Amino acid sequence: MFIETLGAARDMARLAEITGVLIRHGFGDSVRRLGLADKLERAGHALHWNNVADLARIGPPEQVRLAMEELGPTFVKLGQVLAGRADLFGPEWITEFEKLHSQVPPVPLALLLPQLREDLGGEPETVFARFDTTPLAAASIAQVHGAQLHDGTQVVVKIRRPGITEVIEADLRLMERLAALAEAELPALKPYRLKQLVRELAKSLRRELDLAAECRHAERIAANMAALPYIVIPRVHWAHTGLRVNVQDLVDGVPGSALDRLTPEAGYDRGELARRGARAVLKMIVEDGIFHADPHPGNVFYLPGNRIAFIDFGMVGRLTERRREELLQLLLGLVERQPQAVADVLLDWTGDEHGVNLSQLETEIESFVDQYHGTPLAQLSLGQMLSDVTAILREHHLGLPSDLALLIKAFISLEGMGRGLDPDFHMATEAAPLLRQVVRARYQPRALATRGWQTLSRTLALAGQLPHDLSRLLRNARRGRVQVAIELAHLKRVGDQLDRAANRLAMALVIAALIIGSSIVMTVKGGPTLFGLPAFGFLGFTGAMAGGVWLVRAIWRSSRASNGEGQD
């Protein structure tokens, strides 16, 4: 049973809180269908089913967004992850998810100090020449304070919120169980791959909780960007950096949200900034295989000399060499209008072809790409093309792997920022030369020989292992140890229903026995009495009546739940 598997009492309280928020935001029907209401009410939690009147005027996407904001940091982060899944959700949902932000009231310094002293090894006023008690920014996982090192370097100190790990882990436990339950009980939610989305969220959140990992990402990307002197990545001060705190150079520039300050009089060339930003992110994606996965205006600063600084590497994307090769094929297919190349890559990426009309899907993709035939390269919107492709996949209930969904989100954000800087900016124009250059580099004789040798080495290793694997398989077969795993999604539910039916049958037999036994006792003269009746017979009838009421109530509740499912 769902409730009985919860690991701690605090999970039960949090589940009741989540359920209450869902009911308040108009999702009471889903709560009933998941079976949470009955279980929580049995556990003594009172649920209030009165919906707010103005919810009728709010669409489901906004209702979900408001519920996520009320539920706190874990659910806000989930919404931010979903904002990048245009392959699963329509534009109206993505628009609402993008409104989610993690700005929260700051933690008072008095609550931060014990943890900060432990992490820094001393008082902040001693470790730093200056430590600002007023935070520069506060988010759901960490908040940032300004400081100055003893050598005069201006830095920012990012501090993880105390107790946030326990809150997030409890929420993740519940979300994993709720996702599994929802996929089993609400078939309409299956295309959204809830369990996979929760796994993605868990990985993303656990990486963000490690503030030292963010710094390792920053240093790795800084090393990759060394060839581009106009890209700035803040330096990490490892002497003061750990799991719960990190210290990096302060970036003092024009934030990405203040484009009106990027004037020629101030020494900025907005067209050059757009081109340089595009080249940097394209290099991260196509050449390096590790990229800033959230390049929104809050994470970008513009510096004198038309330099660009990227900050906050808590969320990064990674692409294997094979993925990068597939990405090159896709982007070149879009830029050079080769529909068959695009269709081949997308069909490989989606993987799950069950129940999909592949011929129709391929025809739609080819028709989509072919409509750009003859369009000048400077007029192509690469971000819009990627959005349209994911919309086609969504219509066919096909989802992209999480790394590619993150990549497409980064591409679309990047092109939007470029157009904001320079209305004449065209991502396709910037991407085409780099893509062709990388393709040429990959097909040089030396690169081909290297990849060929790696493939041959892996093949020989597998061939050498094959006799041993076959021997093990045959030995297990002789011993009768060969197992075939069959997963039936609803088998547990059927077992639970049989178990409940058996319990009710057993109770009915006990009630019948009590009635018969009490009737016999009533005919026996003598012995103690109660209200003028034989005491044991009276108690037997009382127990039988209580059991009967319980049995009738259980059958009625079960019938009501079944009727509710049937109506839905």
Image (spheres, helix red, strand yellow):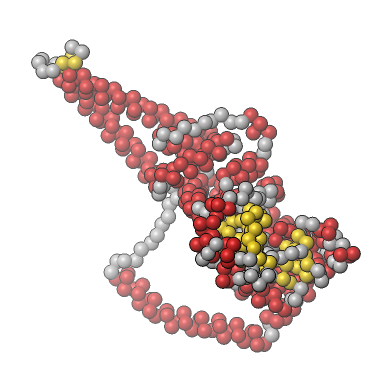
Residue appearing at x 57%, y 68% in the figure? 240
Q: Position of residue 414 (x, y in %)?
A: 74, 62
- Image height of 500 relative to 245, above or below: above
Q: Can residue 204 be seen by looking at this rendering?
A: no
**Closer to us: 245 or 369:** 245
**Closer to us: 554 or 66:** 66
Q: Residue furthest top?
A: 532
Residue appearing at x 59%, y 31% in the figure? 51
**Closer to us: 132 or 516:** 132
Q: Position of residue 509 (x, y in %)?
A: 25, 30
Viewport quadrant of the C terminus:
top right
Q: Position of residue 413 (x, y in %)?
A: 72, 59
The part of the image, by quadrant, that contains residue 531 is top left
The part of the image, by quadrant, that contains residue 355 is bottom right
Residue appearing at x 73%, y 67% in the figure? 309
- Image height of 371 relative to 94, above or below: below
Residue appearing at x 62%, y 48% in the figure? 105
Q: Can residue 112 be seen by looking at this rendering?
A: yes
Give the side of residue 524 with respect to residue 188, left or right: left
Viewport quadrant of the N terminus:
top left
Give the side of residue 476 with respect to residue 153, left or right: left
- Image height of 314 relative to 38, above or below: below
Q: Total label count?
A: 0
Q: Residue furthest right?
A: 265
Give the side of residue 442 with respect to residue 32, left or right: right
Q: Position of residue 79 (x, y in %)?
A: 62, 50
**Closer to us: 334 or 293:** 293
Give the side of residue 464 with respect to residue 49, left or right: left
